[in-house]
Image (cartoon, grey):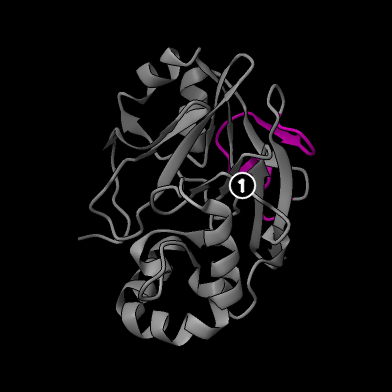
Amino acid sequence: MPAKASGLGSLNVVDDFDGGFGWISHPHETMERTSHALAGDDGVWAVDPVDAEGIDARFEEWGGLTGVVVLYSYHRRDAAAIATRHDVPVYLPEGMSALSAGDIAASVERFEGRLPGTDYQLRPVTNLGPWQEWALCDGETLVVPESVGTADYFTAPGERLGVSLMRRPLPPTALDTTDPERILCGHGEGVFADASGELQRALAEARRTAPRMYVRHAPTLVRNLVAATL
C-alpha cells in the first residue's frame, strides 16, 4: 500500500451534503487524501483536489467549476491540472508566501476574506515557516486541510477526529472559536455528527493523547512525512 498514489484516481465520493461533496481518489493509499467541491453562486469550487476519473462530469452536475482553491502550502496536489483543464484560476490565500505563481502551472489569483460567490470566509490556521494553512468556514461547514483529520494515522485510540502529527505539541487554537455542523478534512472522511464537540475534544486532548498516537502509527507517520515532501 503506497503512502501517496500517483496517476489518475477514481471518483470515490465520501462526503455528500447539500452544499457540495468530497472524494478520495486513491482509497488504498495511507495518506487518505480527500478533496472537496463547495457549492457557490455559479458552480462549485474544488478545494485541494486530487484528480479522478469522472470528476469533470460531477462538477457539471453542480453547474461547472468556478475555481480551484489551495488552502495548505503542501497541497498543490492536482490543482493546476484541473484548473487548466477547466480554464479557471487557482486561488491562493493572500498571505500564503510559501507558494507563488511560479509554483503553480496555471493562472493564479490571490484572495482574502470571503471566497467569491460563497459564504465561506477564509480563516488563518497556522503560519509556522513552510507550514502555511487556512480553513474555510460558512458557519455550518468547516473545511480544514491538514491540522485535523479523520484518517487513521491522525487519530489516537478511541478518537474519531484527531490533530495531525506535527500539530499535536501546538494544537491549532485558531479553530477554537468555530462551532460547525460538519467538518470536511483534507485527510479522511468528514465529520457530520457532533462535529463541534469532536473538534473541541480533539483540540483539548491533542497533547495528552499524542504518545499513544505516535506509538500506534509511527511507521505510517514516517512514510507519509517523506511522501508529503516529494
User: Can see residue 17?
Assistant: yes
Taking 12 as reference, is 198 above or below it?
A: below
Between 105 and 218, the one lying in front of the other is 218
Of all residues shown, which one is farthest toward the left? 1
Q: Residue at x 54, y 73 (%)?
A: 166
Residue 95, x across and y down, in percent: 77, 50
Q: Residue at x 39, y 50 (%)?
A: 33
- Tell me if 76 is positioned left or right of 223 in this view: right
Give the quarter of the figure containing the C terminus: bottom left
Element under label 1?
loop
Residue 177 sits in which quadrant? bottom right
By secondary structure, the bulk of the magenta-drawn segment is best described as loop
Taking 78 as reference, is 185 above or below it?
A: below
Q: Amino acid at mark 1?
A: Pro
Between 158 and 117, the one lying in front of the other is 158
Please rate how many residues cluster around mark 1, counting C-alpha atoms within 10 Å: few if below 14, some from 14 to 19, many from 20: many
Q: Which residue is mark 1?
A: 180
- Tell me if 94 is positioned left or right of 210 in this view: right
- Asked if the stretch drawn in magenta spans residue 78, the answer is no
Q: Residue at x 48, y 82 (%)?
A: 210
User: Can see residue 78?
Assistant: no
Between 164 and 87, the one lying in front of the other is 164
- Asked if the stretch drawn in magenta spans residue 103, the answer is yes
- Tell me if 92 is positioned left or right of 184 in this view: right
Which range of residues does the magenta coloring cover?
96-115
